[in-house]
Every structure is written in C-alpha cells, then in structure tokens.
Amino acid sequence: METESYTKPLSASSGNDKAEHPSMDFTLPEGEKFRSLPPQISLSEFIRRNRQLRAWFPKGIRTASERWEAKTMVEFRL
C-alpha cells in the first residue's frame, strides 16, 4: 500500500515556483550614527527608572506562567 505525501514546498503552495530570495546586501550606518550596543545610562538614571518601575508595579511584574495561570483559572465543565 502506498501513502500519498501531503506536504509540498512553500513555493508550490503560493503558486510561484521561481520565488526569489530576499537580497542579503545591506549597508549599515557608519560613524556616529552606528551603535552596536544599547545606549548606556548613568547609575543615578538607572536607579530613578527602577524606582519608577517599582512605583508602577508595586507587587512586581508577573511572569509569563503567572499571567497564564491567571487566565486559565476558570474551570469548564460539561
């Protein structure tokens, strides 16, 4: 018994067999415009922002699992 394959390439499903790949040629900004690292802030600014965050969220920011548990506390019964 032979099984039929139901998977096909993405280009076949889109109807475009000769799909072009995007170009990998790009230019990065040079000199003063380019920063490979995130911006640095002073320690006092970091402390100020941390205090502001704690004021907004006094109980702390919930983790993803805590947010999921809060959404799924409803029990469904048939």
Image: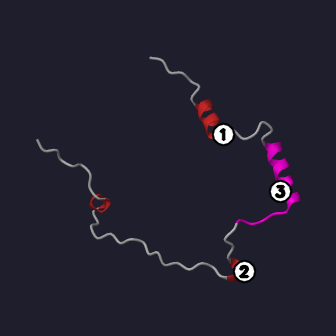
The residue located at (78%, 41%) in the rendering is 57
**Which of 24/74 is in front?**
24
Quadrant in which the N terminus appears: top left
* Residue found 59% across the figure and 25% down from its top: 73
| Secondary structure state at the residue bearing disc 2 | helix
Q: Is residue 34 left or right of residue 46?
A: left
Q: Secondary structure at mark 1?
A: loop
Whole-number angstrom distance, CA of label 3 to CA of label 1: 22 Å
Question: How far is mark 2 from mark 3, CA to CA?
Answer: 24 Å
Question: In the image, which disc is placed on residue 46?
Answer: 3
How many angstroms separate mark 2 from mark 1 (CA)? Answer: 38 Å
Label 3: few (<14), some or many (≥20) within 10 Å? few
First of labels 2, 1 by sequence position: 2
Q: Position of residue 38 (x, y in %)?
A: 71, 65
Amino acid at circle 3: Phe
**Residue 41 placement (x, y as % from top left):** 81, 63
Residue 39: which quarter of the image? bottom right
Q: Is residue 43 toward the left or the right of residue 69 in the image?
A: right
User: In the image, what residue type sits under mark 2?
Assistant: Glu
Q: Looking at the picture, which amino acid does disc 1 mark?
A: Thr
Find disc 2 in the rendering and name its residue.
Answer: 32
For the view shown, which residue lies furthest in the top direction? Answer: 78
Tell me which residue sits at (83%, 43%) in the image. Answer: 55
Tell me which segment is drawn in magenta.
38-56
Labels 3 and 1: the sequence-earlier one:
3
Tell me which label, 2 or 3, sits earlier in the chain: 2
Q: Which mark is residue 37?
A: none
The quarter of the picture where residue 17 lies is bottom left
Looking at the picture, the colour scheme in use is secondary structure
